[in-house]
Amino acid sequence: MRVALINPRFRLPIDTRTTPHLGLAYLAAVSEKRGDEVVIFDADVERQPIAEFVQEFRPDLIGITANTPQVKQAWRTAKAIKEVYDCPIVLGGPHVSVLPEESCEKPYVDIVVRGEGEDAWIEVSNLLEEFLKDQPVYSTEAFMHPENEVFRNCLGITYKTSDGQIHNNPDRTPIADLDSLPWPAYHLFKMEHYTNLQPATDSVDGSRSFSILTSRGCPYRCTFCSQSIMPIKWRSRSAQSVLAEWKHLVEDMGALEIGVLDDSANIRVKRLEELAHLLIENNLNHVPWIFVNGIRANLASKELLTLLQTAGLKRVAFGVETGDDEILLSIDKKVDHDTIRQAFKNAKEIGLETIAFMIIGLPGETRETMQRTIDFAIELDPIIANFSMMTPYPGTKVYEIVKRQGRFLINDWEDYVFFEQKARYEMGEMTAELVEEMYRKAYRQYYLRPSPIIRRLKTKDFWFNLPRNVRIALRTFIPKKEKSGLRKQMEAEGAI
Ligand code: B12
Ligand code: SF4
């Protein structure tokens, strides 16, 4: 069969990095293994209109990915396709996994795959191929006809039969053996169009920077974190399997840096130690790599970090979130500030670069707690302090808390991005004005100090990408005037 996988165009409010979509890369890989002809249409880098593309490629099955700010564009994409071309359209990804019916109700969406997608996607492909064998003409309506009961036993999907009824099948169990998955199909991306996810080495060409996933899931449940895709059960690949892919990235794809995208890569320390030894033994440690997401601070001993550094680790990120003790307890991070301090000390003493992810505007925050977050970031002094405006994603505990006790200031999924200066909600004493003021203060107070400025001026990236960096600086430091539609409406009604 011919299969198209689509990443709908979505530009963040600040210039961001465009990287190949790893979820689609995995889905493409399992489809290729099944024997399909696969095209990945990444609207972030493609210039061709989608309608033209599908009419040319004529896929038998289309999959579209959607996180929350992308979902409306996913619907627009599905609609544009259905207007010119008949084909079942499947949506998957973090947003539709939490709210599958919302998408399935759209006339142009047929199936939603919930959670980890590979197995359900392959089952839908098999069912379609089987069905098409006895069909004189191709028709999505026939495929989705209630009498055919094609999807009766297909786990992990929500689908709409052609009579308009929505059916929610039971969940699918997570993939037990991650080593059985093929490697992400990077060869299907136009790598020359991408930037690198996080430049570990200064100014690396995007086509030479790759991501890898060595484990899936996270056993924690922080209240702000959207964990809709990966189940609570943490699963890992064997060190041997990771080594084989790593070798492929370096030796066949010419990787000049590698980003480890795991949610919590260091849950099992022994596995990481084994991987580190293998990378060293196989002379792969000359290629720098980074933990793009936060690793657990409570499992980041100096011994482990030293070994990982010998294996090529250049930069490590930690989810610090807040500088206030009570807020830290309230978000279920299950770590304390002294442990975080120690993890940063361990990393910095051996010369690793560090990143701290911080959040401004968690439920219950005051001016003082947010100031503690800024002060704690300054105390830790990572090379990157990333302050996010708290954005309550559907499916998270914070979303439920705000629904019960606060007021949302946005009602458009496209506003669910967290590097914006606009507050997303208000709760109790925590007004939008206060959160926005503290968000801007965080960036100003952190970055307008001599040491971060000198650090930045010393990087090649700063000078090579000067216009982009100046744009980011302007957006970050200069207050933004415009407000969301809902906010304007609430102000007009005197609700704010
Ligand atoms: C790397 C990453 C990024 C990177 C790159 C994203 C990319 N191109 O892939 C960058 C830094 C650019 C990024 C940006 C953002 N991200 Co991000 N990101 C991640 C991260 C850490 C890993 C993504 C990944 O590769 N996962 C592994 C792959 C295998 O999983 P997957 O992509 O979800 O795909 C699987 C399933 O979802 C499903 N699936 C997905 N699509 C489809 C489609 C079909 C047809 C089917 C059948 C199945 C299916 O099957 C796939 C295979 O199992 C995740 C956390 C996580 N654990 O996933 C957050 C995460 C996806 N990001 C998140 C967010 C919020 C964002 C931003 C909105 C943040 C912001 N700046 O405001 C932006 C949005 C950017 C955009 N343009 O869309 C949230 C999404 C929450 C939500 N409800 O949408 C997550 C879940 C983090 C979290 N825990 O809160 N992100
Ligand atoms: S923030 Fe990190 S530790 Fe917390 S649930 Fe999300 S991935 Fe797990």
Image (tube, rainbow, N blue to C red):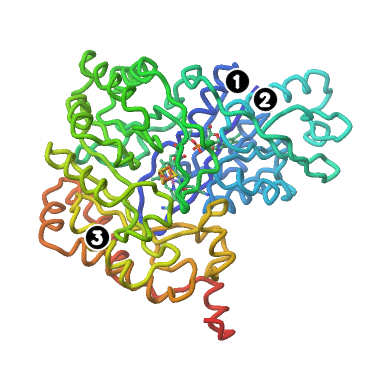
Q: Residue at the location (43% across, 50% down)?
A: 332
Q: Residue at the location (47% across, 52% down)?
A: 223
Say what amino acid the circle numbered 1 marks: Asp
Q: Residue at the location (33% across, 57% down)?
A: 322
Cβ atoms under marks 1 and 2 closer than 8 Å: yes
Secondary structure, mark 3, is helix
Q: Earlier in the sequence, mark 1 or mark 2?
A: 1
Q: Nearer the viewer, residue 1 or 492?
A: 492
Say what amino acid the circle numbered 3 marks: Val
Query: Which residue was labeled with disc 2?
Result: 125
Query: Which residue was labeled with disc 1?
Result: 36
Secondary structure, mark 2, is helix
Q: How crowded is mark 2: few (under 14 residues within 10 Å), some or many (20 or more)?
A: many
Dividing the picture into quadrants, the one containing residue 275 is top left
In screen coordinates, is 164 left or right of 110?
Answer: right
Q: Which of marks 2 and 3 is nearer the N terminus?
A: 2
